[in-house]
Image (cartoon, rainbow, N blue to C red):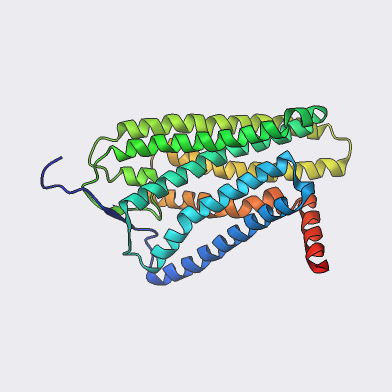
């Protein structure tokens, strides 16, 4: 690095390139979605903790997903809301790297959790007699720990490769948070190794898990088709289709972002895709996976009755 170059100590997140009036509209909309995300996932966590009938493997994984979704949104949304109010406000280099790390940790964990949740449903529907043996608490806890450990380790690899690069040029990140591809564009060195590692990691953390999820749901749908009751078949199809919709949005937007060829307007498209990670998926997950469930509705009624009786 030349002697007249200086290392960046902070970055400016450019966010959404819209008018100041539109910033206010976006602030209100995103703030509302953030509150809904916290409330929805918070209610799920509270019900699972308070109601012993929800102490099952399925709801254990749902509680893990709720924790990840709250963490996901809280890592990116407050910073984005602050930037909508004050676009010129900078984020320190250390804070930016930490945001990148945490985002990737939670993204990796959610990928793995979705696989484990689909496997749990596969065992419950296709092998009901073996369910309690195959999905005992030791297995569930081991799977959850594996998800968090693998997610943290993979994110650490990306961040360590990022930290070896010098940042001596522009400070403006064309994104609403410190997303790794956007940060890499500001590096004053060759980033081919970083991009290669990201692509290889995507094959293992996106393509592989997506294939496993699709295989699980293919077997589940096969079992559903053998259900004699038309009403039961309709209910099962409704549940599976909504789950696959969430999975498709999550994995699809991630694969397009990190593995597809880049178009001319990719940076603006990327911001829209990442809204699904930060807002829509964390907001939809409680509704799709839990709040429509009769067991969760029953748990909510029991908790409310208990509170009134007290």
Give the answer, above or below, for where 292 lies relative to 59. below
Which x, y percent locates residue 230?
87, 41
Considering every residue shown, the one lying at the far bottom of the view is 21
Q: Quadrant of the image for the C terminus?
A: bottom right
Horizontal side, residue 101 vs residue 73: left or right:
left
**Is 178 or 153 nearer to us in this picture?**
153
> Can residue 107 be seen by looking at this rendering?
yes
Residue drawn where x is 63% and y is 60% of the image: 39
Residue that extends furthest to the right in the rendered view of this protein? 229
Give coordinates of residue 53: x percent, y percent. Answer: 79, 47
Residue reaching furthest to the left: 3
The vertical placement of 102 against 34, above or below, is above
Residue 281 appears in the picture as rendered: no
**Quarter in which the N terminus is drawn:** top left
Q: Residue at x 48, y 38 (%)?
A: 152
Residue 175, given in percent of the width and then of the height, sits at: 38, 53
- 215 shown above or below 20: above
């Amino acid at each position: 690095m030349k002697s007249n170059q200086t290392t960046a100590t902070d970055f400016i997140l450019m966010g959404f390139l819209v008018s100041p009036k539109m910033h206010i509209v976006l602030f209100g909309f995103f703030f509302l979605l953030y509150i809904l995300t916290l409330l929805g996932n918070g209610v799920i966590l509270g019900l699972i903790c308070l109601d012993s009938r929800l102490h099952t493997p399925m709801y254990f994984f749902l509680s893990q997903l709720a924790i990840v979704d709250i963490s996901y949104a809280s890592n990116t949304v407050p910073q984005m809301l602050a930037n909508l109010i004050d676009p010129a406000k900078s984020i320190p280099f250390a804070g930016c790297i930490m945001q990148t790390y945490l985002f990737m940790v939670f993204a990796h964990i959610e990928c793995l959790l979705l696989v484990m949740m689909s496997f749990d449903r596969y065992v419950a529907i296709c092998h009901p007699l073996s369910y309690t043996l195959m999905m005992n608490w030791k297995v569930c806890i081991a799977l959850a720990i594996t998800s968090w450990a693998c997610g943290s380790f993979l994110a650490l690899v990306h961040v360590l490769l990022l930290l070896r690069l010098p940042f001596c040029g522009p400070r403006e990140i064309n994104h609403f948070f410190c997303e790794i591809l956007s940060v890499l564009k500001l590096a004053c060195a060759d980033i081919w190794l970083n991009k290669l590692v990201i692509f290889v990691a995507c094959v293992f953390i996106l393509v592989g898990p997506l294939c496993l999820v699709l295989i699980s749901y293919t077997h589940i749908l096969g079992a559903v088709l053998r259900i004699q009751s038309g009403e039961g078949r309709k209910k099962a199809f409704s549940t599976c289709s909504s789950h696959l919709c969430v999975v498709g949005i999550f994995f699809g937007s991630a694969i397009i972002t990190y593995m597809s060829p880049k178009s001319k307007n990719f940076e603006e498209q990327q911001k829209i895709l990442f809204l699904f990670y930060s807002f829509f998926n964390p907001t939809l997950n409680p509704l799709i996976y839990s709040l429509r469930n009769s067991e969760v509705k029953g748990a909510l009624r029991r908790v409310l009755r208990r509170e009134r009786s007290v």
